[in-house]
Image: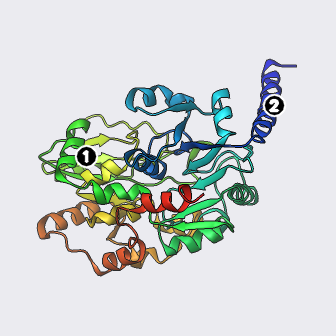
Amino acid sequence: MSSFLSEILRSQFMLFLYKIVFKLIGQFPPKKKLIIFESFHGKQYSDNPRAIYEYMLEHHIEYEMYWSIDKRYMEQFRKRHNIRCLQRFSFQWLMKMARARYWIVNSRLPLWIPKPRETIYVQTWHGTPLKRLGADIEEVHMPGTNTEKYKQNFTYEATKWDYLLSPNEYSTKIFTSAFNYKKAIVESGYPRNDFLINHNDEKNILGIKKREGIPVNKKVILYAPTWRDDQFYTKGKYKFNLHLDLEKMKNDLGEQYILILRLHYLVSESLDLSGMEDFVINLSNHEDIRELYVISDMLVTDYSSVFFDYANLKRPMLFYVYDLEDYRDKLRGFYFDFENQAPGPLVKNTNDLIEEIKLIEENGYTPPRTTIEFNERFCSLEDGQASKRVINEIILNS
């Protein structure tokens, strides 16, 4: 038997044994004051779990709280944050996860993890959907799966959730369908957006810029695109081509603007930005995009859910959709008429993008009708109190 095959068999056996131990420990009564948080598979200290965690700390809601962290990120977590960390899938993690009263997570957990009967699994999710999700996707183009398997796995994991957070009525309807979800939905607004309401001030903005080395005398364009399902290296590692003429953007905009790149956490590209250092700053590894929102004067994105959050700042948004027809008709499809209802202009090449930025610079920014209607539909619950509502509804009531 080859050593490679031996490793596979051994790992499968260890996984089986690990699941058995997890189930056995999960039979004991939970520790009622124990909460495990996880964001984007243990890669970040961010998003809705972070907002809930920090609200609980700030308001002295006394619980034993730990963060589930991918072992590749443990060192940076320990250096940067004064938080209790558990290495994901370690024995210590198993002991805590299996006895926790609450799991507060923003992405799907691995299917093999057995949820103890008395654990309350709070799925915060991580975005208002434009592109189709889960069971609503007609044809899946991701590696390592097929359409039927993907939908089954997606909806099976959702059966473990006890609560699902929703940012608005629109999302509530979609989540129910896309996840085939039948349990409690807390329509609260997104806790992560509390930061945009409560910390959007000059002192905070200046502090973030100085810490990240961003010139304070230039305006900031944030480019935050999503990933493409069918452009990948392997499962969980996706390719991305900027499709931007950075040299032209620098020549036309560089005196007044800095461009910040924030690629999706699934994108594994290593960008060559040689010669662009005084115009382009790659902050794709900046763990929480909320800080990049507040320091940016405008957002450029595509089909990413970031624009639903950024809309709360009431600043200009441009949509760089060079592959609109392919993405809409082949990869995902949309839940609403994006072309006519997007809260900003749609452009398909660098020249048009530059032209729209210059128009804003010359004429100032007046929100178009679509933006006003968009905010009324999607952002009405975002008042800086979403974390409080979630904690009152779930933690303090159960």
Q: Residue at x 58, y 55 (%)?
A: 123
Q: Above or below — where is 72 with respect to 257?
A: above
**Residue located beneath label 1 in the image:** 247
Three-letter amino acid code of the residue under disc 2:
Leu
| Nearer the observer, 69 or 274 | 69
Q: Amino acid at mark 1?
A: Glu
Given residues 49 and 217, the one toward you in this image is 49
Where 288 sits versus 226, above or below? Answer: above
> Which of pointers 2 and 1 indicates the residue nearer the eye?
2
- Determine crowd level at label 1: few under 14, some 14-19, many 20+ residues with C-alpha closer than 10 A: few
Residue 136 image offset from top left, x and y in percent: 64, 68
In percent of width and height, residue 81 lies at: 40, 33
Q: Quadrant of the C terminus?
A: bottom right
Crowding at label 2, few (<14), some or many (≥20) Cα neighbours within 10 Å? few
Of the residues under marks 2 and 1, which one precedes in the sequence? 2
Q: Is residue 366 above or below residue 37?
A: below
Q: Is residue 63 left or right of residue 308?
A: right
Left or right: residue 35 compared with residue 369: right
Q: Quadrant of residue 3 in the image?
A: top right
Does residue 47 appear in the picture of this structure? yes
Q: Secondary structure at mark 1?
A: helix
Locate residue 18, reporting x and y percent.
77, 32
Q: Mark 2 sits on what residue?
A: 17
